[in-house]
Image (cartoon, helix red, strand yellow):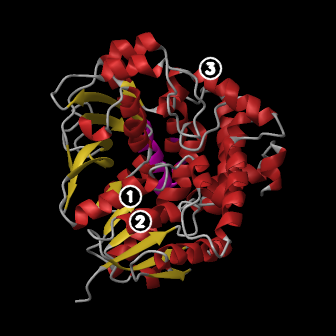
Amino acid sequence: MTKGVKIVTIGGGSSYTPELMEGFIKRYEELPIREIWLVDIEEGQEKLNIVGEMAQRMWDASPYDVKVHLTLDRREALKDADFVTTQFRVGLLDARVKDERVPLSYGMAGQETNGAGGIFKALRTIPVILNIVEDMKELCPNAWLINFTNPSGMVTDAIIRYGGWEKVIGLCNVPVMAMMTESKLIEKDPKELIYSFAGLNHFHWHRVQDLAGNDVTGQIIDKMYDEENGMPANIHGVPFFKEQLKQMNLIPCGYHRYYYRSEEMLNHMLEEYNDPNVGTRAQQVKQTEAELFELYKDPTLSEKPEQLAKRGGAYYSDAACETIASIYANKNTPIVVSTKNDGAVPDLDPEDVVEVTAYIGAAGARPIAFGSLEPAQKGWLQLMKNMELCVEEAAVTGDYGILLQAFIINPLIPSGETAIHVLHELLLAHKNHLPQFADKIQELEAAGVEVKDEVVRSLQ
């Protein structure tokens, strides 16, 4: 048997790939990589070549002899892989522009993983990830799938529920970011604190203790209101209501702002949407990404540039690479992951995928029990999980009725005729990536339904 680990990254042309390489180089002594395969699609070939050459330069500048392979042939790459990481965006960044602008054109929240936009990102992504799983069953049946593709929780749940693939862990950089920034607020090293997370991806809460077992959550909450609060670059920093956090004695995920401060977040999104010089977050990201790829072209650049933090993906490699290293070396490291609940959060079904703190080792994720949530948080959690399950079913079956149910129960989508307009326009905007809804899309086109946002129309 050939020694060393084979890692395949699907969506290898992503601007995040240098972050991933940095993490692997840092951990090479405990994760001896033999070869890395970066896979992308034809439309992503130019970026794949640029970022692939950059990745090879990073390895060449290290003490380690690792070959980076580039390919558009997923099956060639997957053969005998040990770990497969996924970080792709179906429809590329233009699809994200559509996810944001169509709802906002109707005065509704337009966001990448929340509300109508998040639902449509899942509808496009889940069928693709399930195809990848089918290839893995044939070509690398013993590999671990480490999913970073958003919406990470729904995608991971669908991999287990509909793909029948248990060797999967979903990841997100948001919990790592919280741990790194909050520890500084109370002048501690993250290793001096015990974090307990529970909830769903982009919809979790956590509490914090010191090593003596004393709860320090309240201290951190107090500090959040007089210090830099360390929000990811992609979340507008309107503060939570302090009394609410003190009552919960839990710290919500940054994305909870879309639910706890919906009015202010929507106003901010509409302000950017209506300013042609700013545009939605996706339009801003396109600009940042263009700048990053210009930097990556520099033949002398062999380390991750600082500008990558602007993409909102800081600590990405710490989550992904540490998870892989922990499985490979059976380290049993506590990491926040999306994994099967198995009773960690009793308010949800044991089969549901949740985002929780878990010990990661050779057997995968062993979730740490968090216990039941209080009524306010429990109500939110159960609503959001069941909304996600409707979205997953719609993605797999193409059932318009179940998709409608997801729209109606999603808290960021006011139900009524406007929601139907948004739903129909998003179906049309993404028709090339939604073959499961082909009949409904054809019906809408025959009825003369059109997308009203000019920017979205220009991307069709």
Q: Secondary structure at mark 1?
A: helix
Asked if marks 2 and 1 touch (Cβ < 8 Å), the reply is yes
Q: Which amino acid is tagged 2? A: Thr
Q: In the rendered image, which residue does mark 1 sit on?
A: 320
- Residue at image point 28% right, 70% down: 29
Asked if marks 2 and 3 touch (Cβ < 8 Å), the reply is no
As measured in the structure, the alpha-carbon distance from the residue carrying label 3 to the one carrying label 1 is 34 Å
Quadrant including the N terminus: bottom left
Q: In the rendered image, which residue does mark 2 sit on?
A: 85
Q: In the rendered image, which residue does mark 3 sit on?
A: 263
- Residue at image point 54% right, 60% down: 16
Instruction: Answer with mark 2 or mark 1, whichever residue precedes in sequence.
Output: 2
Instruction: Answer with mark 2 or mark 3, whichever residue precedes in sequence.
Output: 2
Q: Main secondary structure of the magenta part?
A: helix
Q: Nearer the viewer, mark 2 or mark 3?
A: 2
Q: Nearer the viewer, mark 3 or mark 1?
A: 1
- Residue range corresponding to the magenta coloring: 386-401
As measured in the structure, the alpha-carbon distance from the residue carrying label 2 to the one carrying label 1 is 8 Å
- The answer to if 393 sits in the magenta stretch is yes
Asked if marks 3 and 1 touch (Cβ < 8 Å), the reply is no
- Residue at image point 31% right, 63% down: 324
Disc 2 packing (10 Å; few <14; some 14–19; many ≥20): many
Q: Which amino acid is tagged 3? A: Glu
As drawn, the residue found furthest toward the top would be 243
Disc 1 packing (10 Å; few <14; some 14–19; many ≥20): many
As drawn, the residue found furthest toward the left would be 212
| Residue 251, x across and y down, in percent | 38, 26
Quadrant including the C terminus: bottom right
- The answer to if 136 sits in the magenta stretch is no
Instruction: Report which quarter residue 66 is drawn in.
Output: bottom left
